[in-house]
Image (cartoon, rainbow, N blue to C red):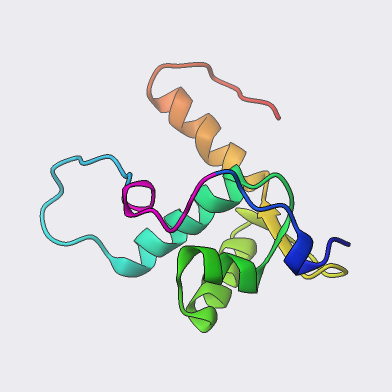
Amino acid sequence: MIPEDTAEKPAIDWTDEATVDATPSTGLLGKPVGAVTSAIRVLRYLSAANSSVRASRVARDLQLNTSTCFNILRTLTHENLLDFDTNSKTYRIGYGIMDIARKATFVRGGIGIVRP
């Protein structure tokens, strides 16, 4: 188990507004839903991480309320988009995200199967 203070930090500076807000603009009508935006930021953060990360670290690096971040992590884990290690109490991107990516590539006429 890597202690939280010595755990390797993702190479991306998540406090940089340009990085945090680097989402594609698709001309959506209305304002984006904050909870969904935060969940996507968490997914992007964990996908860039070189190792599993504790909830408090995710909240701190993304400047999210700790309780909100924990609820997002728990929900994404329940939906199989994240994996939770009960021993180290850390999260990492899960293989469930591959199912979404595979279906997206199929719908767009790309490859029909993606394997980890």
Hey, which quadrant is residue 23 in on the image? Answer: top left
Q: Position of residue 36 (x, y in %)?
A: 37, 62
Residue plotted at (45% across, 70% down): 63
Above or below, comparing residue 16 to residue 88 in the picture:
above
Above or below, 110 against 51 in this view is: above
Please say whether residue 45 is one of the residues in the magenta stretch: no
Looking at the rendering, the stretch of residues picked out in magenta corresponds to 12-21
Q: In the rendered view, does 104 fall on the left or right side of 81?
A: left
- Looking at the rendered image, the quarter that the N terminus falls into is bottom right
Q: Residue at 74% across / 67% down in the picture?
A: 5
- Where in the figure is residue 84, as x and y percent of width and height? 74, 63
By secondary structure, the bulk of the magenta-drawn segment is best described as loop
Going 54% across and 70% down the picture, which residue do you hit? 60
Q: Where is residue 42 in the image (x, y as percent from the top left)?
A: 51, 58
Numbered disc total: 0
59 shown above or below 111? below
Q: Which of 54 and 34 is in front in this view?
A: 54
Please state which of residues 15 and 70 is positioned toward the viewer in this rendering.
Answer: 15
The x, y position of residue 45, in whole percent, is 54, 52
